[in-house]
Image (tube, rainbow, N blue to C red):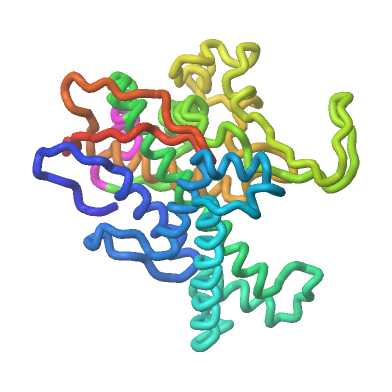
Amino acid sequence: MPSVRRSGDPFDPKVLFKNAASNIICQLVFARRSDYSDDTSPKVVQKLVEALYLQRTVWGLLYELFPGIMKHMPGPHNTIFSNYLDVEDFIRKEVERHKEDFDPNNPRDYIDAYITEMQSGSSDTEGFTESNLVLNSLDLFLAGTETTATALLWSLVLLIKHPEVQKKVQSEIDTVIGQSRPPSMVDKANMPYTEAVIHEIMRIADIVPINVPRVAGRDTTLGGYFIPKGTPLWTNLSSVMFDKTEWETPEEFNPGHFLDSEGKFRRRDAFLPFSAGKRVCLGEQLARMELFLFFVGLLQKFSFSTEEGVELSLEGEVGAERTPLPFKVFIHTR
């Protein structure tokens, strides 16, 4: 993470979190990262952030509802597609750059590993093509940057609104990890309360309330309803995350939803922020690791509050994802 603001002034953490999350994907895909000191994201991330923002606006929603009409209409929604084309072009240039100094015996990143697989004789029918490499890399940025940053923003909102939870998480961190070493994934098994808090944050934040759109691949019947081939489909994840028959206090922030009577972490079948089935989010494990390490690393070293008299909102802005309303935080070194 970048150095902490020490001026005493509250600040919006959104840019810092987006840079931190995007740097993980940049390192995985391109084997390099951006510099925090310039306070800007790489070009590829800026384009994606703008496209995702436009998808949350009325223009993006109108396109999803009426694609046959909107694709012929002028408007900001067209920027979504031009930005994605720009990002694809950016990634193609990266692929070409990798080819120039590619060493199959020393892969540096995802692109090198994919090129190695293509050159090993994997056929097009197995999906190892350059076009798929570009689109897969694009998917990594789409799924691995904005949602992780948004989850961290919601974490601060909820911890500031519930300082007793923040202190209890810090107590568990101090007991299991201490202050002298950074957290690792092996610590998670020994931190049931922290794990419960992270899960409850993801549940109540409801970052992707309406799952990404799908299209029926063939005529089918579901729950007595006939769905013709080609029908756009959305799954309502909120209906599960706030189901009164599944959660004791669905409308309240309650880490106890994920703790048993002995204080051990318990999994819940109704917890589906990453969807389920064959179309479950492929980046789920990476996202879980990122969120745990960021969350624990931040609370290990710092405490968070907001301006006196300010009540942070849980309403959020809903579009392609559900994001917190703009807010500012104070950071206190522990």
Q: Quadrant of the C terminus?
A: top left
Q: Residue at x 60, y 39 (%)?
A: 274
Q: Point out residue 44 in the picture as x, y percentages from the top left corner.
A: 44, 63
**Image: magenta residue range:** 170-180
Asked if residue 225 can be seen in this view, the reply is yes
Rendered view: 117 above or below 228? below
Q: Most extreme residue toward the left, as rendered?
A: 7
Q: Quadrant of residue 315?
A: top left
Relative placement, left or right, of 299 versus 6 is right
Magenta highlight: main SS: helix
Point 41% across, 45% down: residue: 149
- In the image, 94 versus 115, the foreground residue is 94
Percent x, y for residue 267?
59, 27
Q: Residue at x 36, y 32 (%)?
A: 325
From the top left corner, tell me how far across and down residue 142 is, in percent.
Answer: 53, 53
Query: Where's residue 92, x and y in %?
Result: 55, 75
In this image, 7 relative to 31: left or right? Answer: left
Residue 270 forms part of the magenta stretch:
no
Q: Is residue 185 visible?
A: no
Q: Nearer the viewer, residue 221 or 5?
A: 221
Camera-nearest residue between 65 and 99 = 65
Q: Tell me: residue 247, above or below residue 272.
A: above
- Quadrant in the picture for residue 166: top left
